[in-house]
Amino acid sequence: MITMHPSRRGPSRMRAIAFSFFMLIAALDQAAKAAARARLESPVDLTPFLALRLGFNPGVTFGLFADSGAVGRWALSAVAFLIIGVLLTWIWRTRSAVTAVAASLIAGGALGNLLDRLRSGAVTDFIDLHWGDAHWPTFNLADAAIVCGVALLLLTVRGSDGRPATSTLGRAAR
């Protein structure tokens, strides 16, 4: 009979789940963007503060670097590719399930937006949050996953008593 050492089984299972979650986030984002591109001919108001409005962002957050052209597109893509690589390395090295989930959210969102940028030169956005005439910049599921992943990481950086919690961030960067 072959038995596995318990400490060896846990990390590999956690990695498999984290990498699957990473791919699921990217796939859900791509499916939602494809549906938005296919069906959103005009804005659809869902609630008084939420609408679906199709938009394309050739830049990054809040449209930064939108006027950078092809060089900017490829530079942003290269940076995103590097960030995804660092996050996947972090997932591989961490023993923290929370850190693995957070990094998976960020990496999956980054991959979803990278695929858009490579395919069409711009990221498809379609979620419009607003209050009256004040609109938050339109975003997508990848952006939401990235924000949730960063928030989760920030929550894990501090322990409940206010002292810094143990983190594996430094080890992944080495």
Image (cartoon, helix red, strand yellow):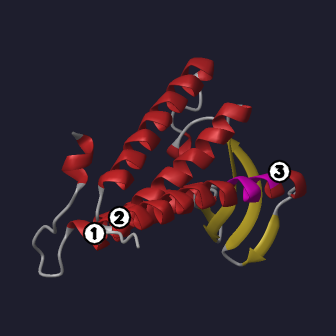
Q: Residue under circle 3?
A: 37
Q: CA distance from mark 1 to mark 2?
A: 7 Å
> Which kind of residue does numbered mark 2 sit on?
Pro
Residue nearest the viewer, comparing 17 with 169: 17
Q: What residue appears at the point 64 percent right and 57 percent down from the top-left corner?
A: 140
| The residue stretch that appears in magenta | 30-34
- Secondary structure of the residue carrying numbered label 1: helix
Closest to the camera, between mark 1 and mark 2, is 1
Of mark 3 and mark 1, the one earlier in the sequence is: 1
Residue nearest the viewer, comparing 31 with 123: 31
Closest to the camera, between mark 3 and mark 1, is 1
Q: Residue under circle 1?
A: 7
Left or right: 22 as drawn, with respect to 97 = right
Q: Quadrant of residue 136?
A: bottom right
Left or right: 13 as drawn, with respect to 48 = left
Closest to the camera, between mark 2 and mark 3, is 2
Decide: few, some or many residues near mark 3? Use Cα within 10 Å; few <14, some 14-19, many ≥20.
some
> Which kind of residue does numbered mark 1 sit on?
Ser
Q: CA distance from mark 3 to mark 1?
A: 46 Å
Q: Is residue 18 above or below residue 26?
A: below
Residue 28 spot, x, y in % from top left:
68, 60
Q: Residue under circle 2?
A: 11
> Which kind of residue does numbered mark 3 sit on?
Arg
Predominant secondary structure in magenta?
Answer: helix
Residue nearest the viewer, comparing 52 with 168: 168
Residue 137 appears in the picture as rendered: no
Residue 42 spot, x, y in % from top left:
87, 57
Q: What residue appears at the point 18 percent right and 81 percent down from the top-left corner?
A: 160
Specify whether residue 91 is painted magenta: no
Q: CA distance from mark 2 to mark 3?
A: 39 Å
Of mark 2 and mark 3, the one earlier in the sequence is: 2
Q: Quadrant of residue 113?
A: top right
